[in-house]
């Protein structure tokens, strides 16, 4: 018996030792890919030495004798810190994820192949200006220099993920950088889904007057009287089954409510306490670890430029020079249209055009799949654009038999000069220079906010499709592709894009709100990303005669919900302080406690208090009750609360109060009934998940920011090392926006927020500040993987300085790249 236990102990000890050795081996191999920042390296592709000075936040300050050498240094720095991220994004846009991840990413690859953005990017290389083409080539040489160093020095394949997911990859090319910009355009637009959702909702509603309630226009515009979708496209199956988009974390396709968003505003000297211009910008994208953004400073021959870059793209997308600052927000341009194409009844390889039936342009595309047989796709294009299968974007639900759907989209242009436009912006010195530089920007549609030392301005940049005034649906709904009046007629000249230069009031700003009221077809969009944050921003800006850097920071971090302040008096009007005295533990008592808390709340979505959770759960349950009866299963597509819808219903705008009555029940329910029932729904859901002690709830516990690793984030044990989760304030409609997931076990998770914040003060440019949401490194063993995360959560910033001495004084490393002798 003693011998048995001795052997058992030896076996257990051996297993423990093997596990420890295994962990040590994995750590050793993974740590080999940690970059060394303090070194000298001889490389090919530069003419003079390049210095990469990394300050104490690991922000690279790149110095070289020529601009091309500086862009080489940026490519090298990006690849040092974010090689896995760059390669994964490139695989995404090329439709080649399945080569590494197998069948689980096949649906993403199929859809990306049909968009064919990588091919459009390759075609667009030749139309870039000489300066941009030289920068793209130099940048690619820098990326490839790091890849070559990794291969020759056996540096753990450059990233721990590349050790875990074996793959071969080709050298970086200029077209890859253009393709990543097109991928960003895909992530920032949701017009396809808006069109399809409007069509499906039109089919589901028995009363078409109610369409404008659930999908309301932004305030300030008249309601267009559009035909029913069923009359535009006859024989559409009304109850077609829904088909979701690819759900993998690497999917660039998200809910339309989670398409791009952002804030940006600027103040002229007359509205600045220091007499210099001010600019604040915080672009909102899906949260991830590492963040999409990467901070960098480029010392170009025209002067220093510093700000936020996206690894893989050699431009500072949001930042400043000594003379000019620029910020970007998603413009919600109506840049996509779905066309319903009729197939030839005698030959399905032909489709109908205004002049008769014509053959599709077709091409075969083979998708290689890890551990599975390859799949061959037949890509088809019409004169309107690529054909998308009914399984994507729920297109089958709005496409009648004998038809297919095709897409027109500005980002599909093979002559896309957007990279040249953003490159030229970095060399601009004035607002006027910035406007001139970005004339050639195509996609994504962005609202560009500018501030030089004396002036401010804002302009929508990007191609606006030119539609016929007789278009059947005005681009709001999918339209028949063979009718000439529905087809695009090119794009408007950039001079037609709305702009606001040197405003009399001294302040410009955008929160994805409606920019301009222009009748179709000169409109910008029928769908805007905000009707709520702009109300709070306007108040904060007008509450002060003059502003400072700190007041701009205060506005950027503001967490007061205008929606909560506006909706609670409406939905609680008949519930406040009413009802009989209720015993402890009863439903009536719990409702009274919740209403008491909300009645004393100022609408601040603070992470430390319970009211934001009670409010959010209430309005979410209320919208579900209002629409479930009329929309049935389609109600599940409305994942986020639309404040304008709730307001229309409770104010009975245009008879919208009809939503409160449940048509399938005998009694006639009032809006007060629905508000009370929804509050009970919310409280029951809260109790089941978090307990009955309402006062002990914390909004931040459910509204955690989900900086999750897109590949390793769900791996047991490992996810605790690669994911960054934080309690956060804010909500769907606050300036410090933390957009909730809207679906899943916890629909209140913060999944979409400001991954970058910057505030620039041109009275003292080096007092400007910025921050990103995680850290500079994409390597989860690096101390720079999450070192900015807590600063970001607390609303803190780091200096945004072009002072070379300051960068060198606190440097964590200086990399010197020496040119190889020819």
Image (cartoon, rainbow, N blue to C red):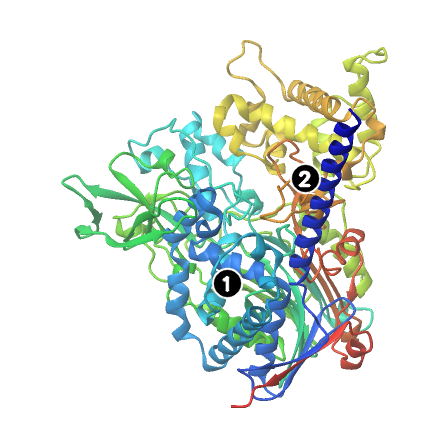
Identify whether 778 is placed above or below 132. above
Numbered circles on residues, count: 2
**Position of residue 788 measured from the top left corner of the image (x, y, whole percent):** 76, 58
Along the viewing direction, whichever of 141 and 580 lies nearer the viewer: 141
Q: Residues within 10 Å of mark 2 (few under 14, many from 20)?
A: many
Q: Quadrant of residue 160?
A: bottom right
The answer, for residue 194, to whether it is visible in the render is no
**Position of residue 686 measured from the top left corner of the image (x, y, whole percent):** 73, 25
Q: Residue at x 69, y 65 (%)?
A: 266
Q: Say which label, 1 or 2, has the lower sequence index.
A: 1
Identify whether 490 is placed above or below 711. below
Secondary structure of residue under mark 2? loop
Marks 1 and 2, how far apart in space?
28 Å
Q: Residues within 10 Å of mark 1 (few under 14, many from 20)?
A: many
Q: Quadrant of residue 592?
A: top right
Residue 532, label in figure: none
Q: Quadrant of residue 600?
A: top right
Identify whether 226 is placed above or below 41. above
Pick the quarter of the image with the N terminus. Answer: top right
The answer, for residue 196, to whether it is visible in the render is yes
Residue 749, label in figure: 2
Q: Is residue 91 left or right of residue 484?
A: right
Q: Residue at x 80, y 71 (%)?
A: 767
Along the viewing direction, whichever of 458 and 286 lies nearer the viewer: 286
Residue at mark 1: 181
Q: Residue at x 64, y 20 (%)?
A: 674
**Position of residue 652 measured from the top left corner of the image (x, y, whole percent):** 59, 28
Q: Is residue 354 left or right of residue 592?
A: left
The residue positioned farthest toward the bottom in the image shown: 822
**Position of residue 306 measured from the top left corner of the image (x, y, whole percent):** 68, 73
């Amino acid at each position: 018996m003693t011998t048995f236990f001795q052997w058992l102990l030896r076996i257990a000890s051996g297993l423990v030792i093997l596990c420890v050795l295994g962990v040590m081996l994995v750590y050793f191999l993974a740590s080999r890919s940690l970059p060394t920042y303090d070194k000298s390296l001889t490389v090919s592709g530069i003419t003079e030495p390049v210095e990469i000075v990394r300050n104490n936040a690991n922000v690279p300050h790149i110095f070289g004798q020529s601009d091309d050498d500086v862009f080489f240094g940026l490519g090298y720095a990006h690849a040092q810190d974010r090689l896995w991220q760059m390669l994964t994004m490139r695989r995404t846009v090329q439709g080649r994820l399945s080569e590494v991840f197998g069948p689980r990413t096949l649906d993403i690859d199929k859809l990306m192949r049909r968009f064919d953005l990588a091919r459009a990017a390759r075609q667009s290389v030749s139309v870039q200006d000489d300066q941009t083409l030289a920068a793209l080539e130099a940048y690619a040489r820098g990326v490839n220099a790091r890849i070559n160093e990794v291969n020759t020095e056996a540096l753990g394949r450059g990233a721990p993920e590349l050790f875990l997911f074996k793959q071969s990859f080709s050298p970086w090319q200029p077209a890859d950088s253009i393709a990543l910009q097109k991928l960003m355009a895909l992530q920032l637009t949701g017009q396809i889904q808006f069109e399809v959702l409007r069509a499906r909702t039109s089919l589901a509603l028995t009363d078409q007057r109610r369409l404008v309630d659930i999908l309301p226009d932004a305030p300030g515009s008249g309601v267009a009287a559009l035909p029913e979708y069923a009359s535009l496209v006859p024989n559409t199956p009304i109850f077609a089954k829904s088909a979701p988009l690819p759900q993998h974390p690497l999917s660039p396709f998200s809910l339309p409510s989670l398409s791009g968003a952002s804030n940006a505003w600027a103040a002229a000297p007359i509205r600045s306490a220091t007499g210099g211009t001010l600019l604040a910008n915080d672009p909102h994208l899906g949260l991830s670890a590492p963040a999409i953004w990467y901070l960098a400073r480029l010392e170009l021959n025209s002067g220093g430029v510093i700000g936020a870059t996206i690894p893989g793209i050699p431009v500072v997308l949001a930042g400043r020079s000594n003379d000019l600052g620029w910020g970007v927000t998603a413009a919600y341009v109506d840049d996509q249209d779905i066309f319903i194409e009729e197939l030839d009844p005698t030959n399905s390889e032909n489709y109908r055009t205004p002049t008769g039936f014509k053959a599709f342009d077709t091409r075969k595309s083979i998708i290689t799949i890890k551990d599975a047989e390859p799949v061959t796709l037949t890509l088809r294009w019409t004169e309107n654009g690529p054909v998308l299968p009914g399984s994507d974007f729920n297109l089958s639900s709005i496409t009648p038999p004998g038809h297919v759907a095709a897409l027109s989209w500005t980002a599909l242009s093979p002559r896309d000069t957007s990279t040249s436009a953003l490159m030229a912006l970095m060399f601009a010195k004035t607002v006027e220079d910035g406007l001139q530089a970005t004339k050639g920007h195509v996609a994504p549609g962005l609202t560009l906010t500018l501030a030089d030392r004396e002036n401010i301005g804002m302009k929508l940049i990007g191609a606006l499709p030119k539609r016929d005034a007789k278009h059947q649906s005005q681009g709001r709904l999918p339209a028949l592709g063979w009718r000439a009046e529905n087809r695009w007629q090119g794009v408007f000249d950039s001079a037609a894009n709305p702009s606001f230069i040197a405003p009399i009031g001294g302040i410009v700003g955008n929160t994805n709100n409606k920019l301009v009221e222009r009748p179709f077809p000169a409109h910008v969009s029928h769908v805007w990303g905000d009707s709520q944050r702009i109300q709070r921003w306007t108040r904060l800006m007008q509450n002060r005669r003059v502003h400072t850097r700190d007041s701009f920071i205060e506005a950027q971090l503001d967490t007061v919900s205008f929606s909560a302040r506006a909706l609670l008096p409406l939905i609680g009007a008949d519930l406040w302080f009413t009802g009989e005295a209720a015993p402890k533990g009863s439903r009536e008592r719990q409702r009274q406690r919740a209403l008491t808390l909300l009645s004393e709340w100022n609408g601040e979505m603070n992470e430390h208090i319970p009211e934001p959770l009670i409010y959010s759960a209430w309005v979410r349950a209320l919208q579900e009750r209002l629409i479930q009866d009329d929309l049935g299963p389609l109600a599940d597509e409305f994942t986020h609360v639309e404040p304008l819808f709730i307001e229309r219903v409770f104010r009975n705008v245009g008879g919208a109060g009809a939503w409160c009555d449940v048509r399938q029940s005998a009694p006639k329910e009032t809006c007060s009934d629905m508000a009370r029932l929804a509050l009970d729904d919310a409280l029951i859901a809260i109790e089941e998940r978090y307990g009955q002690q309402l006062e002990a709830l914390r909004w931040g516990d459910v509204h955690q920011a989900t900086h999750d690793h897109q590949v390793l984030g769900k791996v047991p044990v490992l996810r605790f090392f690669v994911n960054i989760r934080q309690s956060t304030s804010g909500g769907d409609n606050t300036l410090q926006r933390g957009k909730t997931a809207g679906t899943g076990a916890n629909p209140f998770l913060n999944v979409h927020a400001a991954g970058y914040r910057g505030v620039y003060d041109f009275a003292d440019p080096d007092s400007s500040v910025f921050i990103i949401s995680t850290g500079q490194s994409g390597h989860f063993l690096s101390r720079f993987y999450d070192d900015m995360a807590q600063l970001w959560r607390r609303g803190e910033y780091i200096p945004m300085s072009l002072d070379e001495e300051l960068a060198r004084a606190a440097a964590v490393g200086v990399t010197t790249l020496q040119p190889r002798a020819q």
